[in-house]
Amino acid sequence: MNNFKDMFFHIHYCNGRKYKEPGQFSPKVARTLNHYELIFVCNGKGSYKTQNKRYLLKKGMLIMITPDEPYSIELDNSVPAGVLTVHFSFAGISFQDGKWNIHEAAKVPFGQPVWELKEYYSVEEQFQKLVDCWNEKLPGYEFMARTLFQQLIIDIMKSRSKQPENYGASLKVERIILYMHQNINTRITLTELSKLVHMTPAYMSRTFKETTGYTIIEYFNKLKIDKSKELLVEGDKKVKEVAQELGFADEFYFSRMFKKAEGITPSQFNSRIVHGI
């Protein structure tokens, strides 16, 4: 899912307006925000303008508005219209070497500010759930809204991956991950994977990082570390045996990778988690 894996979101507010009759809404909005706004066009026609660029709007479009960026939206007042919106901010949060790190993320990694979804029904349904949750304000609604927003982002990324220009690359990334699972106890090379998916190593690596948020080696090591925890918990194997079974060069490199991901060594994990010492 890209760099979203390290993001913590704060929702300022959500809104939803759907007008069944023409002329029931303000035809133009022009402003500058100090936070992000994600807009889904449920119905209607119009235009979105920012930085001297103008986009024609239609049903199924998403607009990502960034902070401190003047923009205007003008809707056609002669036809019914509807939009769903969520206003939010975020920070980057990561867990590494047993420590939490908080930092300002540069931007939402969505790419272009406006895009049209071909298959938008699941996105619209999830967006509506988010807006309804926010408006109902039942106990725990802020936590629930944040969870629904994260699911909305997943749905958006999945929908975008199915677009004709992205679908082929997405399938190849999935093929690489499947191959990793099938060969988790071995060592694989970029040359080996590039032949598998018929891509150059450089283009394959860039595509994989853009899709998953990890390099190929990082992702493969992550799968190995997750598998090692299963082997330590379910079996009675020593750390050296687990490292060998998963194809690590030696147990010391395995221990370094494990501690980087979990904050403790595999021996400490085995003692504390498995044996409760």
Image: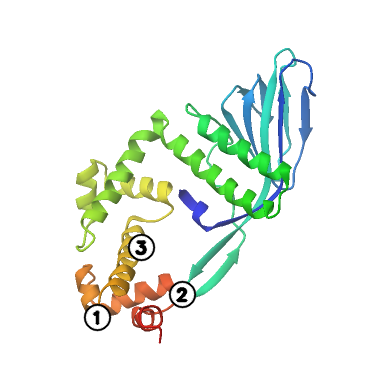
Say which amino acid is labelled 2. Asp
Q: Which mark is residue 139?
A: none
Q: Nearer the viewer, mark 3 or mark 1?
A: 1
Q: Position of residue 47 (x, y in %)?
A: 67, 23
Label annotation for residue 97: 2
Q: Secondary structure at mark 2?
A: loop
Q: Could you tell me which secondary element the residue under label 1 belongs to?
A: loop
Q: Viewer-nearest of labels 1 and 2?
A: 1
x and y, in percent, of residue 83 in the image: 67, 29
Here the colouring is: rainbow
Point out the residue furthest to the bottom here.
277
Question: Which quadrant holds residue 21?
Answer: top right
Which residue appears at 71% of the width and 47% of the height? Answer: 35
Which tag, 3 or 1, sits closer to the chain's start? 3
Residue that carries the numbered disc 3 in the rendered image: 222
Q: Residues within 10 Å of mark 1 (few under 14, many from 20)?
A: few
Cα distance, mark 1 to mark 2?
22 Å
